[in-house]
């Protein structure tokens, strides 16, 4: 993999990290507020919140995985220079 390839991958990972770290929590906060006033039954609201909880956990897992991949590529780039 060339240095240019690695730089493009790191940029793409940074973009993905930004979406996972910022957009998903904001989206979940807004959606949680919306469902409170939706007129849905308590059971349905509870189920939706449960699903949102899973989404939040998965998003956090994605952030961790993306950071590991990014670190790996950056470490590889550093070792290429040495």
Image (cartoon, helix red, strand yellow):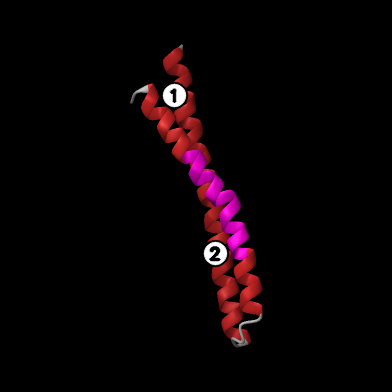
Magenta residues?
13-28
Secondary structure of residue under mark 2: helix
- Determine the main secondary structure of the stretch shown in magenta: helix
Q: Between 80 and 22, which is closer to the camera in this rendering? A: 22
The residue positioned 57% from the left and 60% from the top of the image is 56
Q: Is residue 25 magenta?
A: yes
Residue 49 versus residue 16 in the image, above or below: below
Q: Which residue is mark 2?
A: 54
Mark 2 neighbour density, 10 Å: few (under 14) some (14–19) many (20 or more): few
- Toward the top, the furthest residue is 82
Secondary structure of residue under mark 1: helix
Q: Is residue 57 visible?
A: yes
Q: Which residue is mark 1?
A: 76
Mark 1 neighbour density, 10 Å: few (under 14) some (14–19) many (20 or more): some
Where does the image place residue 78, in percent across and percent down from the top left?
Answer: 48, 19
Where does the image place residue 39, in percent across and percent down from the top left?
Answer: 62, 87
Where does the image place residue 44, in percent across and percent down from the top left?
Answer: 57, 83
Where does the image place residue 77, in percent across and percent down from the top left?
Answer: 44, 22
Q: Quadrant of residue 32?
A: bottom right
Residue 25, numbered label: none
């Amino acid at each position: 993999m060339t240095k240019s390839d690695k730089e493009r991958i790191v940029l793409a990972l940074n973009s993905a990290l930004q979406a996972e770290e910022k957009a998903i929590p904001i989206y979940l906060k807004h959606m949680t507020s919306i469902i409170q006033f939706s007129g849905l039954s308590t059971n349905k609201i509870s189920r939706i919140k449960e699903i949102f909880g899973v989404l939040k956990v998965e998003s956090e897992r994605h952030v961790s995985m993306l950071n590991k991949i990014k670190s790996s590529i950056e470490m590889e780039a550093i070792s290429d220079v040495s």
